[in-house]
Image (tube, rainbow, N blue to C red):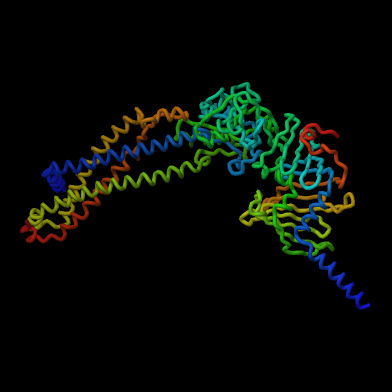
Amino acid sequence: MSVTWRLAWRNLWRHSRRTWLTVGAMVFCNVLLIFLISLQLGSYQMMIDNSLASFSGHAQVQHRDYLEEQRMRQSVPRAAALAASARDALGLETTAARGMAFALVSSEQRSFGVLLQGVQPVYEPGVSTFPGLVRQGRYLASGDGGHIVLGSVLAQNLKVGLGDELTFLGSGRDGSFAAGVATIVGILDTGMDEIDRSVAQVPLAWFQDIFSMGDHAHSVVVRLPSLEQVPVAVATLEGLVGGQDELVVRDWDALQPGLRQAIASDMASGWFTYVVLIVLVAFSVLNTQLMSVLERTREFGVMLALGMRPAQLARLVGMETLLMSGLGMALGVLLGALLTWYLSVAGFAYPGMEELGAKFNMPGRMYPEVSLLSLLWGPVVVLFGAMLAAIYPALRLFRLAPVAAMRAV
Amino acid sequence: MYKFLVACSVLMFSTAAVGQELTADEIIRKAMDHYRGQTSHAQMSMVIHRPDWQREMGMKTWTEGDKRTLVRVTVPAKDAGNGTLSVDGNMWTYTPKINRVVKVPSSMMSQNWMGSDFSNKDISKDTDIIDQYDHELVGNYQQDGHYVYVIQSVPHEEAAVVWGKEVLHIRDDWVMLEQQFWDQDDQLVKTLRTLEIREMDGREVAAVIRMSREGVEEEWTEVRTAAIDFDVELAENLFTLSNLRNPRE
């Protein structure tokens, strides 16, 4: 056995330049795959973090029917206290209670229906990027009462600016008429029209007063440092709301089901590129191995005449391929790991990305994800592709007739 | 003698024919007039029922012609003084809490009126159906010794209406028994049913009507009319914004 391995190894280096070229193609392909896959996984991480950071958080405590029906009465009792105990239990400041109510908001000239958000001015900046995007005036502060921060497009639509008053009409949690007047203290600009057209935030305490909410709110939002902490945090929150059957804890996947779908569809298109890359490398291996088998026809004829069986010869070719692609994989993984590890520490930015990040109150660099999956997925598939490519040259050996082969030119 | 008989029979036939020939448009017109009168003033209560809670409001309403309605809440004390005025399809609401009159934009007209199952439109322009829809008599039946017309009303192409069609059941004394609202996919969305008919101010009036959405029968809103006077004298300025803000009565 070991003789055959040694034979295979020596055969590889009879044409060392050709072998190195093929190995080089594999290494290049592997490094590229590792880089692209970790970048892709890293960008998903970033995409998830960014969209969760903007508003929904990583997990929320809600009334069990609120997500589907969004009714005023489907609320969380003692919400601010629950948010406080969640802060303690999780050891994180990034937890806040929120109330939501549909209301007719009117300026002197215009009226629109909006989803008014009651937020805790002190804690909201920890769970959402919106407070950091106030471009005029200021965000809400503790002690604010009838004050409001709204999106720039909504402000334009209402034809109002800082210091103007808005009136709200809606119905309270008990069904009573809810009405209030609030002064605009800040206008925020997220750069996303859809949000700038709809966001309107008032202090939670004032909101609870206007909408007869008592100490209720509609969600307790938790933002976590990373996605990995979600399951543990969800379990902790579930412990906190244990006794209350009407409350549930929802993780980001339940809150934003579209996110995972968007990632899945992007992943599918990414894989297509990788498959093309892998097929190209496999053909290059096929070419090398076919050449090396064809040029050794006479040699193989002699070996057959000496009593080796075609299956043994086929195994020899297989071993050569395995050794070659194993070398390509080892070098590829090593180089790829070094590259992505460096980038995962130093970060990676497209030109203009940092400005973009600053505009949307998001990180300006992306960090590729180094994991066993991102490091090994590509190279392992390349290895299998190379082995598949060796099948055809190996099969040719079974059709070899010793005498004819020895006479072949 | 013969001539007399002929004349009689012609007369009979023609009256019968008149009875038969009442068009769907006329039936709806009569039902609306019956319900609103030239003018009316009523004491009503609205009960909003949900599986886990219920809420009751007392209101006074005034109507004049087809296009003017004023609703003012009297009970509970917390909400007393809130009012809604609609004139010619425009709607304003007044809230004493903030002492302001706010115009309800047309985009909000299909929203619920104060958490009830009635939309703003249902509250304000209930005679829109007369000129924005095409009416067709599609059936009839007998009930409690009355003849009931079934009319299907389909909105005009360009009408600003969210419904695909409405189906109305109108009794021959012009009491509306049922009004069904169908969406544009031909699904029944909600139904307004008359649960109780009483004589008030010399007319048979739908004293209790209930709006419920299809499929959620445990959620409904009832409007109960305690008293109604038809063709009353109304102050000139009743349907004005200044009266909405500062009621003079």
Q: Is there any visible trace of residue B120 in the rendered image?
A: yes
Point 64% across, 51% down: residue: B158
Across and down, in percent, residue A278 comes to: 28, 46
Q: Position of residue A61 (x, y in %)?
A: 57, 36
Residue A63 x %, y %: 61, 39
Residue A210 position by quadrant: top right
Horizontal arrangement in the rendering, residue B160 relative to residue B147 (left or right):
left
Q: Left of A193 or right of it: where is A390?
A: left
Q: Furthest-top residue in view?
A: A143
Above or below: residue A75 compared with residue B189: above
Give the camera-side residue of B104 and A408: B104
Tell which of A94 and B59 is nearer to you: B59
> Is residue B162 toward the left or the right of residue B226 in the image?
left
Farthest residue to the bottom: give it. B2
Instruction: Identify the residue at horizontal 82%, vertical 46% (top origin).
Output: B225
For residue B249, what is the image quadrant? top right
Query: How many marks do you count on the picture?
Result: 0
Quadrant containing the C terminus of chain A in the rendered view: bottom left
Quadrant of res B144: bottom right
- Is residue A323 rendered to the left or right of residue A67? left
Q: Is residue B9 above or below residue A386?
A: below
Q: Is residue A194 above or below residue A137?
A: below
Q: Please, which residue is most extreme toward the left here?
A: A407
The picture places residue A396, in percent across and down from the top left corner, at 17, 57
Q: Residue furthest front?
A: B3
Asked whether the viewer can see residue B80, the reply is no
Residue toward you, A26 or B190: B190
